[in-house]
Image (spheres, rainbow, N blue to C red):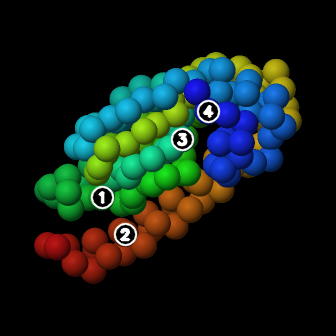
């Protein structure tokens, strides 16, 4: 598992004490995936929040009449979060994620993380603040991608 020093390299853990970061890691497991592996599928139950330790993934959204490779709205790489939907009520994936190269993820159980955030509001605030930053970035990326898609509908 990751050491406290390794954890602090990732923005998700930076505002947390070592003890609080360790509490989150206790809910997690490390997953190694080869390239071209589907990690999550749009519309399915969201179960884990992922931190990308190594590798790169694509995020694609279903667009009628477009091939999946033409509907990629973002890419995710080292240090970024994937699967913030696991922290929301209803918890359904908002996109499909696929590895672009061999990838190592820290998979954090979403249900247990939500329970931890409810019990320890310092963790809850830090997690939600970081996740909200990620959601804002993804929203901006998606808007730009959609503008490009509409500007080049056959692209």
Q: Earlier in the sequence, mark 4 or mark 1?
A: 4
Q: CA distance from mark 4 to mark 3?
A: 12 Å
Q: What residue is disc 4 on?
A: 2
Q: How many marks?
A: 4
Residue 117 visible in the displayed image = yes
In the rendering, at what x and y percent does residue 125 appear? 80, 40
Element under disc 3: strand
Name the quarter where the N terminus is drawn.
Answer: top right
Name the quarter where the C terminus is drawn.
Answer: bottom left
Q: Earlier in the sequence, mark 4 or mark 3?
A: 4
Residue 2 sits above or below residue 103 on the image: above
Q: Earlier in the sequence, mark 1 or mark 3?
A: 3
Q: Earlier in the sequence, mark 2 or mark 1?
A: 1
Q: What residue is disc 2 on?
A: 145
Q: CA distance from mark 2 to mark 4?
A: 35 Å
Q: CA distance from mark 2 to mark 1?
A: 8 Å
In the rendering, at what x and y percent does residue 129 appear? 73, 48
């Amino acid at each position: 598992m990751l050491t406290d020093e390794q954890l602090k390299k990732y923005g998700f853990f930076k505002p947390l004490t070592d003890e609080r970061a360790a509490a989150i890691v206790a809910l997690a497991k490390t997953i190694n995936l080869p390239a071209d592996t589907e990690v999550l599928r749009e519309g399915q139950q969201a179960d884990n929040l992922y931190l990308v330790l190594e590798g790169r993934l694509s995020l694609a959204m279903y667009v009628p009449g477009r091939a999946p490779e033409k509907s990629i709205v973002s890419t995710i790489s080292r240090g970024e979060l994937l699967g913030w939907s696991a922290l929301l009520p209803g918890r359904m994936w908002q996109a499909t994620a696929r590895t672009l190269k061999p990838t190592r993820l820290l998979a954090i159980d979403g249900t247990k993380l939500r329970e931890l955030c409810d019990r320890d509001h310092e963790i809850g605030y830090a997690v939600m603040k970081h996740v909200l930053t990620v959601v804002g970035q993804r929203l901006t990326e998606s808007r730009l991608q959609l503008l490009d898609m509409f500007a080049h509908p056959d692209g």
